[in-house]
Amino acid sequence: MPLINMPEFSGRLLDDFAARGAMRIDTPVIQPAAPFLDMAGEDLRRRIFLTESETGESLCLRPEFTIPVCLRHIESATGTPRRYCYLGEVFRQRRDGDNEFYQAGIEDLGETATASADARAVTDAVQILGHLLPGRRLSVTLGDQAVFEAVVRALGLPAGWQKRLIQAFGNSELIKQILLRLASPQPVAGLSADMASLVRQDEAALISHIDRTMQDTGYSTNASRSPREIAARLKEKLSLAETRLDGTALLLLSEFLSLELPLADASAALAGFADAAGLSLGSALHRFQERANALAELGIDLSRITYRAAFGRPLDYYTGLVFEVSKAGDEAVLAGGGRFDRLLTLLGARQDIPAVGFSLWLDRIEKARAL
Amino acid sequence: MTITIALPSKGRMKDDAAAVFEKAGLPIVAVGNERSYRGKVEGRDDIEIAFLSASEIARELGAGTVDFGVTGEDLIREGLVDADRQVEIAARLGFGRADVVVAVPEIWLDVETMADLGDVAADFRSRHGRRLQIATKYWRLTQQFFSSQHGIQLYRIVESLGATEGAPAAGQADIIVDITSTGSTVKANHLKILSDGVILKSEACLVRARKAEHDGDPQIKGIMEAVQMAL
C-alpha cells in the first residue's frame, strides 16, 4: 500500500538496507500495549496512543519498531543470526513535532561476534546518513553500559548501591542524587528494636515471623514478595546503612563519569584510568577496545567519534554499546542505536539472543536534507 | 452572562459545599424537587447550578462547559493534563480532606521510603518474572510521582475502580496508590504509608475554568471573593 507521506528517499534507503544484507520485515500498526509498557515503563503510557479491543485487551499504535521486530522473530522461530530491516510509520504523542512519523532501521539478532556486530551497526548508520546527507558533517556519540558496570563493580561499593547506580545509568540527575546519598548515608528508620535485633541475630526466626504475620493478616506468601526476600533485603539495607563509604570511590566514579574524548584516545584513557585507580575492568575494557578496532577496520575515523562515559539509556535491557548520530552543531538525533542483549529473553525468547540495532528518524533527516 | 457553577450532586460534599455558599451569601436552592440536578442561587438569576458527580465536575471544568466547580484537588490533578493551565484553584474550602498516598504491605519491613521501593521495583522482574504492580485509579498522579519525582520507571499500573486497599492481600497488585482521609482503611488492610509517600494533600476546592471571557468580569470576581471571605 502506498503511504502518502513516505519520505521521497525511502526507495533509496530500502535499496541501501538490501545492499547491506538486511531482510525487510513488516509488523502490524496495531500492537498489544503490554510489551511496550513492560519494557519501557509506565511513563510511556502517556506518550503512546492506547486503545482497547472489544475483549478488553490493551492495544496501541506502534510507537517504535524494535519490540515488534523482536516479537515477530520469536514468533516465527527462525534461526539466528538474522539481519532485519524495517521502514514504516510510528505513532507517539509528542509536544514538539508530529504525532505520526516515519522510522527505519536495522536490527541484528543473534550475531555472536558482538564487537564486529556493534561496529557494523554504527558504520551502517553513519554511512546511510552520509548517503542521505552528502556534504554534511555528522557527529557521533558513543557510550558503553558494560564499561560503566565494570567500573561500579570494581569500585567495591556495596551490592545494593551498585544496583542503584547501574539502574540509573544514563539519567545524570538520578546519578547525581545517588552520589549525594552515598556521600551521606541515611540511618534506617521505621524499624522496631525487636525486629532490628532479630535481623542481626536470627534470620530464620525473622523469616518465620514474617511468614506467620502474612498468614495471620491474610496475605498469600507467594503472590508477591516472599518472607525470605523481605528478610534478605532488610539485612542488606541494615548493613548498607552501617557501611562507611570510601570517599575515594565516589571521587573515582565522578571522574570516570566526566570522561569525554575522541574514541581514538578512549581505550588508552580508560586503561590509564583503571591503572591509576587500581581497578580491574576485565573483559569490558577488552571488548571496548575490540569494538574500536573493528570500527577502524570498517574505515570509520575514530577521531570523529566522541566517547562519553556517562552516556547511556536508563532501560534495563540495554547491555553494552549505545550511540547517537546527529548533524554537527545540531542537537536533533538523526539515528540512535545500541546493544540490547537482554530484550529478547524478556520478551519470551527461550534462549539468549544477542541483539544490536539502530533506528533512523526519517522526519528529522528529511528536514536536515532540506537545509 | 450566565455563570454556571457545578456542585457535587450527593453526600457530605454536597452539604458542605452548600454550607460554604450559604455563608458566602449565595444560598443554593434546587429547581423543582430536592432530587433535581439543576439548582439556582436565590435572588441571582445570573447564576445556574449544575449538580454533577465529583469526577464529572473536573472533566467539565477542563472542557470549559462550566465556569466554576467544587471538587477535590485529587480529581482535578488526575483528570486534567497540565491542570494549572486549564483551571485555577480559587479557594481551598477546608472539607473533603484526604491524601493521595503510596502504601505497601505493613510486613514489607524493609520498605520505608520511595528509595526503598525503587530498589524493590528494580529487582522485581528478575525475581518474579513480572513488574511490580500498583493498583490505583490515579494513574496520572502515580506516574508523575514515580517517574518524574523519584526516577522509578519499572512498574505496571493495574487499574482499580474500587476497594483498592484490598488489592495487595487479594494478590491483584503488590502495592497501592489511593486516597485516604484518616489512614484507618489503610491500616485495617495491613498496609503502611511510606514516609515520603504522600503524593498530594487534597481537599475540596472552588475551581475556576480559565476562560478568556472571565477576565475583568465583575460577576466572576464577586463570586470568588464572596467564597474566599466566607472561609
Image: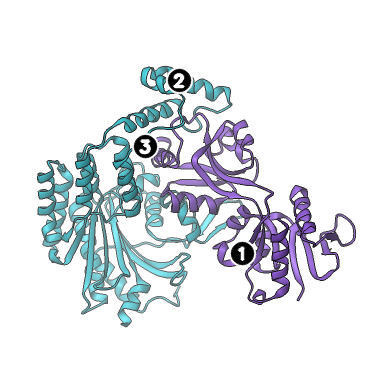
Q: Is residue B167 positioned above or below A36 on the image? A: above
- What element does badge 3 sit on? loop
The residue lying furthest to the front in this view is: B229
Q: Which mark is residue A194?
A: 2
Left or right: B77, with A25 as reference point: right
Colour assignment, chain A: cyan
Subunit under mark 3: A
Q: Residue at x 29, y 42 (%)?
A: A183
Q: Which chain carries label 1?
A: B
Whether discs 2 and 1 lie on one chain: the answer is no
Q: Identify which amino acid the numbered label 3 is placed on.
A: Gln
- Residue at image location 19% in from the left, 42% down from the top: A248
Q: Residue B63 vs residue A278: left or right?
A: right
User: Label 3: few (<14), some or many (≥20) within 10 Å?
Assistant: few
Which disc is residue A186 wearing? 3
* Spot occupied by residue B184 in the image (x, y as percentages of width and height): 63, 34
Q: In the image, what residue type sits under mark 2?
A: Asp
The amino acid type of the residue labelled 1 equals Glu
Q: What element carries label 1?
A: strand
- Asked if marks 2 and 1 touch (Cβ < 8 Å), the reply is no
Is residue A283 shown above or below A16? above
For the colour purple, the matching chain is B
Q: Is residue A299 shown to the viewer in this render?
A: no
Vertical side of B86 occupied by A213: above or below: above
The residue identified by callout 1 is B88
For the C terminus of chain A, the image quarter is: bottom left
